Amino acid sequence: MQTLVDVKEVYSTEGLSLWYDKKQALKDVNVSIFEKQVTAIIGPSGCGKSTFLKTLNRMVELEPKITIKGRISYRGNNLYDKHYPVEQLRHRVGMVFQKANPFPKSIYNNIAFGPRLRGIKNKQLLNEIVERSLKQAALWDEVRDKLNQDANRLSGGQQQRLCLARCLAVDPDVILMDEPTSALDPIATAKVEELVHQLKQQYSIIIVTHNMEQAKRVSDQTAFFLNGELIEQRKTSELFAKPFHKETADYISGRFG
């Protein structure tokens, strides 16, 4: 078990504010994300959860008319410094989306895509990466004999684990997960949650979820957002047992959201 002395900060934000054109989506957010922990981001729809997540790999910049103020540090470096290499960041920070999005390629080529982009051409090494990544995503035994099959023929739960394996294939430091089980049945959801528990031994994971029980099951830290503001961030067990703020208590008890 990690002690406070052992825990390292992977991300920190200071006064992070963001606007889509004139609409403010994040308001003066100060948050810390710790190494090899699962941090859950909770809050009602439209509160800024997914926007915050997308600031961490700068995907939010793909949206039109974005204004960002404040600072986001990743491993001590200012992410929004104009000299920060965005491509390098996206190799280090992988993302799994709400809806599984396999490439229209074979299972093998979905996993090998990222390593090939990074210049890996050796067939044996690619084979090893594909097998390792699929094993990490608990999918290898289900697909080992059909690696040349179109990835879109997999079930929804398998597709989501494939997307996770694709993320793992480039050896990320951080994994961002945006409602990764919202479209899955309970059995597939349980498999993904079990993977999250296993993967945090190697990776720092940030998961946006609307499911309070899921946040309690999988996360070490929980951050509650409301109307673009961070209301509180604490150890998950403490936040759910004795929240500091009335808004948090009302949300986790189901009074709104």
Image (spheres, rainbow, N blue to C red):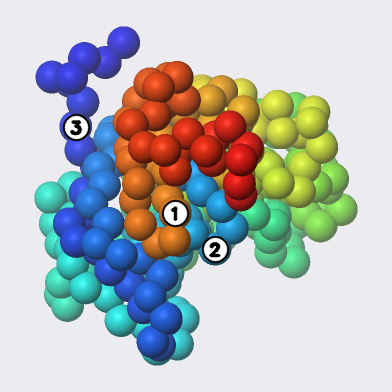
C-alpha span from label 3 to label 2: 30 Å
Amino acid residing under circle 3: Lys
**Of the numbered discs in the image, which one, if any, rests on residue 226?**
1
Q: In this view, does 182 lie above or below 135?
A: below
C-alpha span from label 1 to label 3: 27 Å
**Of the numbered discs in the image, which one, if any, rests on residue 70?**
none
Q: Earlier in the sequence, mark 3 or mark 2?
A: 3
The x, y position of residue 45, in whole percent, is 59, 58
Which secondary structure, mark 3?
loop
Residue at numbered disc 2: 46
Which secondary structure, mark 2?
loop
Mark 1 and 2 residues: CB-CB less than 8 Å, in contact? no
Residue in the foreground of this view, choosing between 109 and 100: 100
Quadrant position of residue 33? top left
**Of the numbered discs in the image, which one, if any, rests on residue 8?**
3
Quadrant position of residue 66? bottom left
| Residue shown at 56% from the left, 23% from the top | 217
Residue in the foreground of this view, choosing between 158 and 234: 234
Amino acid residing under circle 1: Leu
Q: Which of marks 1 and 3 is nearer the N terminus?
A: 3
Residue in the foreground of this view, choosing between 138 and 29: 29
The x, y position of residue 97, in whole percent, is 60, 56
